[in-house]
Image (spheres, rainbow, N blue to C red):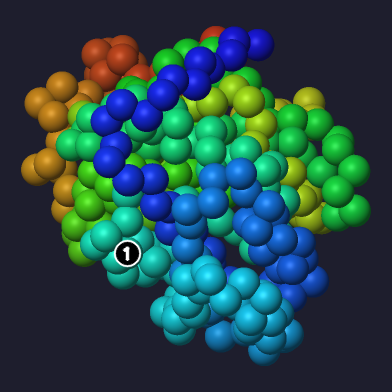
Amino acid sequence: MPKMELKPNTHQKTSEVCIFLALYQGAPYLQAQLDSFAAQTHKSWSLIVSDDGSTDDGLDILRRFQAQHPHRQVHCRAGPQQGFVRNFLSLIQAAPDDLAFAALSDQDDIWFPNKLERAVRLLSDFPETQPVLYCASTVICNQQLSPIGRSPDFPRAPGFNNALVQSIGGGNTMVLNRAALDLARTAVEEATDPVAHDWWLYQLITGCGGHVIHDPAPVLSYRQHSGNLIGANLSLRAKLMRFMALLGGRFQRWNEIGLTALQGSMHRFTPQAQTTLTHYKAARTGPVWHRLRSLKASQVYRQSVLGTIALYLACLFNRI
């Protein structure tokens, strides 16, 4: 597996990270998540929690954590209570103006101690004015945190042509630099509800000419709950299920929602991204020859050859 070189900070003037945690009924695993924040080797961080109306002990756990770390800025705000996607988007929308980086967090993972340090080092290799999104691999664990696998490797470079048809970065690993955060904060105002906040961020930032870092090194233990799709992605059966979903219409519905969510921000896209998007939209309507020709012209791709073949089969059957 390729290793990413960690270079000295040459561009960023400050390394303050604000962690955005979306909370809802997260008490069973929240303490472990918070403790992994406290164990970070990158010490310059603060925490904003958006609680979506929890009725468990999560807020009490958060208050105790705040009392145990009085030198930390730990804030809790009321969430919109419109689902986890809108909760994360509300955190982005309310981001403070004085931070250099924003890290997204779920409520039940365990961050590795160098997670923030690694992200900040890699992001700091880019100018402050360039929107950059960092994401990384994860170790998939069961509910008792015993490892059961790793998130997939992605051999091809991230980019808008991939982002249109595939999400490669889990939101729980994402860290945005200031320019990416400013872009996302503005675009939230223009977006309808996307399928997932992490997929939307990947599409938005690459569409607007930003850069995406996918770090092959795992940075957290992802707790796999029963029925969760991410852990299921490890199995051959799950790959078959995704293929059937592609042909069965689920991908088509997700596409429709995702493209609608991006519509309001299209004026921000690069000319190349706008051309790609125009061809891709054309591949979703019309006769079969027109759809296939438009899909080829769009130059979209999934990370695996089989995934791209499945995409063309879905186009053939008018399922994108």
> Residue under circle 1?
95
Q: Position of residue 211 (x, y in %)?
A: 31, 28
Task: Report if residue 281 is visible in the image.
Answer: no
Q: Position of residue 111 (x, y in %)?
A: 67, 47
Q: Quadrant of residue 159?
A: top left
Residue at the image point whose x is 74% and y is 75% from the top: 27
Q: Quadrant of residue 28?
A: bottom right
* Residue nearer the viewer, 231 or 288: 231
* Residue nearer the viewer, 150 or 236: 150
Q: Secondary structure at mark 1?
A: loop
Instruction: Name the side, left or right, on which 6 lies relative to 9.
Output: right
Q: Quadrant of residue 154?
A: top right
Task: Report if residue 150 is visible in the image.
Answer: yes
* Residue nearer the viewer, 247 or 199: 199
Instruction: Name the side, left or right, on which 180 lies relative to 313.
Output: left
Q: Is residue 137 above or below residue 16?
A: above
Most distant residue in the front direction: 71
Residue at the image point whose x is 74% and y is 68% from the top: 31
Question: Circle 1: is it few (<14), some (14-19), or many (20+) Cα within 10 Å?
Answer: some
Q: Position of residue 223 (x, y in %)?
A: 76, 51
Number of marks: 1
Q: What amino acid type is highlighted by mark number 1?
A: Ala
Residue at the image point whose x is 45% and y is 81% from the top: 77
* Residue nearer the viewer, 65 or 304: 65
The quarter of the picture where the N terminus appears is: top right
Instruction: Name the side, left or right, on which 297 lies relative to 231.
Output: left
Q: Is residue 305 above or below residue 161?
A: above
Residue at the image point whose x is 67% and y is 63% from the top: 34
Q: Position of residue 5 (x, y in %)?
A: 51, 15
The quarter of the picture where the C terminus appears is: top left
